[in-house]
Image (tube, grey):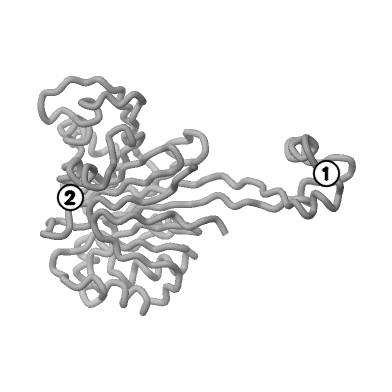
Amino acid sequence: MSVRELVVLGTASQVPTRHRNHNGYLLRWDGEGILFDPGEGTQRQMLRAGVAAHDLHRICVTHFHGDHSLGLAGVIQRINLDRVPHQVTAHYPKSGQRFFDRLRYATAYRETVELLQAPVGADGVIAEPGGYTLEARRLSHPVESYGYRLVEPDGRRMLPDRLAAHGIKGPDVGRLHREGALDGVRLDDVSEIRRGQRFAFVMDTRLCEGVHALAEGCDMLVIESTFLDEDEQLATDHGHLTAGQAARVARDAGVRHLVLTHFSQRYSEPDEFERQARSAGYEGELTVAHDLLRVPVPKRR
C-alpha cells in the first residue's frame, strides 16, 4: 500500500531549543523518500522517527544557512556507511556549490553510494522521475533560496455505474481507457478526471511571486512562519514570513492542508501561530508542526 506523508524531524529556526531540533523534513511519496533541509542533528532525529538512510532517494536543500544544511555531512556519510543500494540525488542552489562540496567532504569516509549532484540555477522543472514532476522556484532571502513543488499528473477514474449503463466490462474497460473511444462510447462518457496531488515546501523567504506559485492548488503546503504578526517588520527585514502571511498565502492558493513550521526561539506559545493563521482567514486543515510529528497528505477529493 502506497504511503504519502510528511515526517517532521525538526522545526526550529536559527537556534534549536530544548523541544525543537534544527530543520529536517522527510516526504514519503509512495516508495520514494525526499529529505528537505537537513539541519544539524537530522541523523539523530531520523533515528528517533524511525527513518532509515535506505528511505532516502532525494535531498532538497532550499539554501545554505546552517539551520537548513549543516546536517548534510552526517546524512551523506550515513547513506554511504549503510551502503544504500540506490542512487541518491541532491538538489540545492547552484550558487552554493562550494558549501555543498565542503559539507559532502567535511571529513574522511568511504564513498559507497552514487550521489548525483543536480544543482538548481533557475525556476522550472528539475526532475521527472516518473509518477511526479519536481519543480523549483526562486524565493526572496538574503542568500539565494529555492522552494520545491511536487506535482503528480492528472489521471482518470472510471465510473462503474456509467460503464455498466453502456454494457462495457472486462478487457473492454482497458481498451476504452487506452484508445479513448469504443463502439461510439467516449472515455469522457464513462470516466472523470482524477486530479493529481500537489505538495510544496517553502522555507526562508519574504512574500514574493515564488511563494504564491509554489503554493497554488496544493494538497499540502509546508511553509515557514518564523515570526508572529506583531513582528512583521522583523520578518521582512530578515527575509521571513509571519503566521498570518503564510496563512493568507494558503487561503488565496486554495491549499487543503497548511503545515506551519520554522519557529523563532523567541516564542514559547505555539497555539498563537494557529490563532493568527485562523484570524487570517485560512479555513482548511492546519497543523502547527512539532518534532517527530507525522502528517498524512490529504486523500484525493
| Residue at 47%, 33% in the rendered image | 129
Q: Where residue 82 sits: x, y (%)?
A: 24, 27
- Please state which of residues 301 and 252 is positioned toward the viewer in this rendering: 301
Q: Quadrant of residue 281?
A: bottom left
Q: Which mark is residue 168?
A: 1
Residue 205 appears in view: yes
The amino acid type found where label 2 is placed reads: Asp
- Please state which of residues 172 and 67 is positioned toward the viewer in this rendering: 172
Above or below: residue 63 compared with residue 294: above
- Label 2, residues with CA under 10 Å away: few <14, some 14-19, many ≥20: many
User: Residue at the bottom extreme?
Assistant: 279
Above or below: residue 177 compared with residue 253: above
User: Residue at the right extreme?
Assistant: 183
- Please state which of residues 84 and 203 is positioned toward the viewer in this rendering: 84
Mark 2 or 1: in front is 1
Q: Is residue 174 left or right of residue 79?
A: right
- Please state which of residues 10 and 159 is positioned toward the viewer in this rendering: 159
User: Which residue was labeled with disc 2?
Assistant: 67
Q: Quadrant of residue 56?
A: top left
Q: Where residue 6 sits: x, y (%)?
A: 36, 51
Q: Which mark is residue 248?
A: none
Q: Element type at marker 1?
A: loop
| Residue at 73%, 52% in the rendered image | 159
Q: Where residue 240 sits: x, y (%)?
A: 25, 62
Is tag 2's residue or tag 1's residue first in the polypeptide sequence? 2
Q: Where residue 148 sits: x, y (%)?
A: 38, 47
- Label 1, residues with CA under 10 Å away: few <14, some 14-19, many ≥20: some
| Residue at 16%, 34% in the rendered image | 103
Q: Element type at marker 2?
A: helix
Q: In the rendered view of the protein, which quadrant contains the C terminus?
A: bottom right
The amino acid type found where label 1 is placed reads: Ile
| Residue at 51%, 56% in the rendered image | 299
